[in-house]
């Protein structure tokens, strides 16, 4: 039985409509456009440096000698007073929640200049 071969020949013999100009480009622009990274490189580096310094200071304070503690204690006291102020905490919470909200919201993006829409 060669019905499949006859059917294939009949299908391939049908005339096809020509593809519109820019079809491939518009499909790729619609499905392959990835959103940009959440953070820029300098922001990631800055966050890493701050976390590394905070960890270093914390460990040195816990394990260091009295001389180091006498130098770092006033700085820690000022930072603790600053971080425990209710107004500061409210502003930090508002800023953090706004940053999280903006990173989670899906805003429409403009089409790229090379992609044509029909």
Image: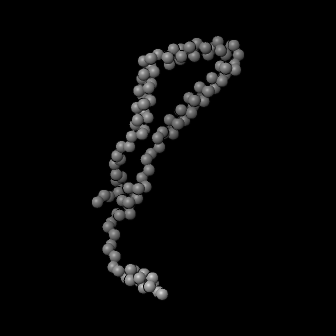
Q: Whole-percent x and y of residue 14? A: 35, 80
- Judged left or right of residue 93, residue 47 is right
Residue reaching furthest to the bottom? 1
**Residue displayed at 67% across by 20% down:** 62
Q: In the displayed structure, would residue 75 be above or below residue 3?
A: above
Q: How is the image coloured?
A: one colour
Camera-side residue: 93 or 112? 93
**Residue displayed at 50% across by 19% down:** 83
Q: Whole-percent x and y of residue 103? A: 42, 38
Q: Whole-percent x and y of residue 29? A: 39, 56
User: In which quadrant is the C terminus drawn?
Assistant: bottom left
Q: Total label count? A: 0
Residue reaching furthest to the left? 118
Q: In the displayed structure, would residue 17 be above or below residue 85?
A: below
Residue reaching furthest to the front? 1
**Residue displayed at 61% across by 16% down:** 72
Camera-side residue: 10 or 4? 4
Q: In the displayed structure, would residue 10 be above or below residue 61?
A: below
Q: In the displayed structure, would residue 44 be above or below residue 23?
A: above
Camera-side residue: 5 or 3? 3
Q: Whole-percent x and y of residue 66? A: 69, 13
**Residue displayed at 36% across by 52% down:** 112
């Amino acid at each position: 039985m060669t019905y499949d071969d006859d059917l294939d020949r009949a299908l391939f013999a049908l005339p096809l409509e020509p593809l519109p100009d820019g079809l491939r480009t518009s499909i790729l622009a619609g499905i392959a456009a990835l959103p940009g990274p959440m953070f820029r490189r300098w922001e990631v580096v800055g966050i890493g440096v701050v976390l590394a310094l905070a960890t270093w200071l914390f460990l040195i304070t816990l394990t260091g000698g009295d001389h180091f503690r006498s130098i770092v204690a006033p700085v820690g006291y000022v930072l603790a007073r600053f971080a425990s102020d209710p107004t500061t905490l409210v502003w930090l919470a508002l800023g953090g929640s706004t940053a999280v909200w903006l990173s989670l919201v899906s805003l429409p993006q403009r089409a790229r200049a090379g992609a044509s829409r029909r």
